[in-house]
Image: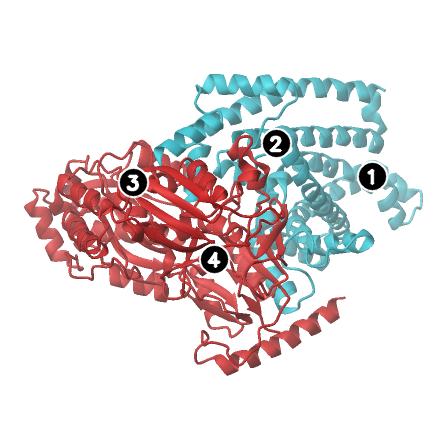
Amino acid sequence: MTSSRFEINRRTALLTSAAIAANVANPFRAFAQETPRKGGVFNVHYGAEQRQLNPSLQASTGVYIIGGKIQENLVDLDAEGRPVGVLAESWEAAPDGKTITFKLRKGITWHDGKPFTSEDVAFTAMNMWKKILNYGSTLQLFLTAVDTPDPQTAIFRYERPMPLNLLLRALPDLGYVSAKHIYETGDIRQNPANLAPIGTGPFKFVKYERGQYIIAERNADYWRPNAPYLDRIVWKVITDRAAAAAQMEAGELHYSPFSGLTISDMARLGKDKRFIVSTKGNEGNARTNTLEFNVRRKELSDVKVRRAIAHAINVPFFIENFLGDFAKLGTGPIPSTSTDFYPGADTPQYPYDKAKAAALLDEAGYKRGAGGTRFSVKLLPAPWGEDISLWSTFIQQSLGEVGIAVEIVRNDGGGFLKQVYDEHAFDLATGWHQYRNDPAVSTTVWYRSGQPKGAPWTNQWGWDDAKIDKIIDDAATEVDPAKRKALYADFVREANTELPVWMPIEQIFVTVITAKARNHSNTPRWGSSSWHDLWLSA
Amino acid sequence: MRILSLAGRRLAASIPTLLLILIGVFLLLQLAPGDTVDAMMAQMGGGDAATARELRRFYGLDVSVPLQLANYLWRLVRLDLGFSAIYGKPVAAVILERLPPTLLLMTSALSFAFFFGLVFGVIAARGVNRWPDTLISTVGLIFYATPSFWFGLMAIVVFSIYLQWLPAGGFEDISTASTGLWRVLDIASHLVLPSLTLGLIFLAIYLRIMRASMLEVLNLDFVRTARAKGLDETRIITRHVLRNALLPMVTLIGLQAGTMLGGSVVVETVFSLPGLGRLAYESVVQRDLNTLLGIVFVSALLVIAVNFITDLLYARLDPRIAAES
């Protein structure tokens, strides 16, 4: 058994390197000369098991990576990042922005054979998106009803104007539809389908062994012609990053999504011809590293001190030496991947300047005291990734040089959220801000005052600024796309001037995938998308 | 019969201990900042306050801590381990799923460590202060001093990536879905590397203990008598010395069954095995109190059972123990 296994691996390795040699110049070139091959099993690294797999109930990459193949959304993003219909064929907004009508695709059935209709959309929107789905409950706050005049039409009615552009940017993530006939009886949160999802997607759920694997197989009745190509997808639960890298190398995994491996392993596998390591296909999952200031603290309430702290940290040096090619200099809360809203770098920036930092601190009245220390602060780093851990140590050392003593307090996930976002027991905190394609979905809550205490990833810094609040509120209901973009440029300018949160590094998740995969990484949220066109070359 | 009543008394005495452990773990986890809803929010990557409030009610976290503890203990009295927040099903079912890999790994690692510890311990004792002893002791020390995650990763690099002899992780091969004997062989091949990794550290301890107790017994009077009787050396070792030297080893195994449950977290993580250790770790990170307490409860039962067996073994190895008690 062992020797035959070895042979197969050697042979596939040779074939793979031959295929790569032909495509080494541009690994993403269209493989026009190749005919898509049906069949094959695609093995995916699954790093953190979730409590459920239904993307109508939980918006996170850990759910999309599985549920996004089984259930489908109304709208997804195309290769250029524009909204493209999936379950919805077309859409139209009334001039006042208070009604948005979706025309649904005909002839789609659920995996159990029942037809998909507008009733399903109305049920999901009112009971899941509006009530349970994280981010969804904010987005759909003013949704009052979904009318279903016929099985192919769903009319969303809003109390206040909903920019069509905002809804379409949000729906790829927050627009997954669940079956009404599965969920209408009983408690939605405890429905067995949450762990054995039933959808309309290209793959049907087969089995979930907790702690081991999840299997889905080809949906023979899928509505797109000739799709999908793969026979099966197997998600293997591997919590240890180094072990996952080893399994990639041993050929037991084909794909590790969302920066699932260590920075050094990703860099190492990037040099290996059997793999493609890239940020492509993750543009829709951009994130920024943050530095959050608790302005209840007297020293940090002074904008001069916040600016001095930003000037004291050499961000380009940190990126070059610790993060490498997978990160770049950030310019504010809206990352450069957001083609619709990125205002450019022409907003207040804080380049590395130690002398200026010292001068600002002196000016603010915090002169160096005994031992050269001006004051000391507590920094809480989030435990999400090794970059945050490195970044917090870098902050500590950089601020030490300008006379601010930093004590780092490390917690696990639950502890971090509790202490920062509920108990406000921090001076500085650092983590990720995940941008979700529209500032109104993910970003403005970091700056808008009046966020309820305990809501994670929102303004819990004690920051209250009427000017920023007004811009945010105006932009959220502005239906003219050009005006909206201008308002968000004002927002970034104001945020960078006052600096309640500093977002100096931009990162995109890194994909590690076998060079045998075709039609991969071809949309900005590919890891979350349905993989209906993905295939494996021989 | 006597030994059984002794064991029965011990079993009864362990109930208050078990209760104290459960209450202790419950309170310790209350000291950790954040609850299971915070952990869930962390996993989701965001949510609002209304969602959080709703979830807290759903998980029964909206009542005071003493009331939560009282609820838990009252359920336990009725042999109900409760409902797991992360798994969405009864804790008993979750644990039952995870128990077989853990027990398999524990048994194979312990047998490996026990057998080779014994053999190498005897060889080292027989060649004391000569090269076999020095070699075995040095290698044993290296095994003992090396962290098991490193061992595991190196084993994967050598045997899975480079030589491609054994699978790099997981409990069984899901692409082939084999049955019967093939499945047994498949699972066995997946357990070779983890068992060796987990066993090596214990092997080092056992061989040191075995060596020391062999040396001690070899100097006792009855060994001299046996030699004077004209028995050959191999017969003396196997029939007379070994049996007496085994007692400390058996004690150690009884004690270490618990350690091994804890120590397997690292090995289970590196080899992606669905065992109890990883479940426990996950429950702490996810603040899933019910699951964690359930694991503590089951582990305590396991340790009690192992100690019970150890007691029986004592009596078998040394009849005087049963007679005296």
Q: Closer to us: mark 2 or mark 4?
A: 4
How far is the residue under mark 4 from the one under mark 3? 27 Å
Q: Please identify, in this view, whether the residue under mark 4 or under mark 3 is nearer the observer.
A: 4
| Residue at the spot 54% in from the left edge and 56% down from the top edge | A45
Res. B243 mark? 1
Contact between marks 4 and 1 (CB within 8 A): the answer is no
Q: Nearer the viewer, residue A383 or A231?
A: A231
Chain letter of the cyan region: B
The subunit carrying tag 3 is A
Type of amino acid under label 2: Val
Question: Where does label 4 land, which residue?
Answer: A529
SS for dot 3 = loop
Residue A410 drawn at (x, y percent): 37, 42
Residue of label 2: B91
CA gap between label 2 and label 4 equals 33 Å
Task: Name the amino acid type tagged 3.
Answer: Thr
Q: Chain of mark 2?
A: B
> Would residue A135 be seen by someone viewing this image from the given angle?
no
B45 displayed left or right of A252: left
From the viewer's side, name the closer residue of B21 and A486.
Answer: A486
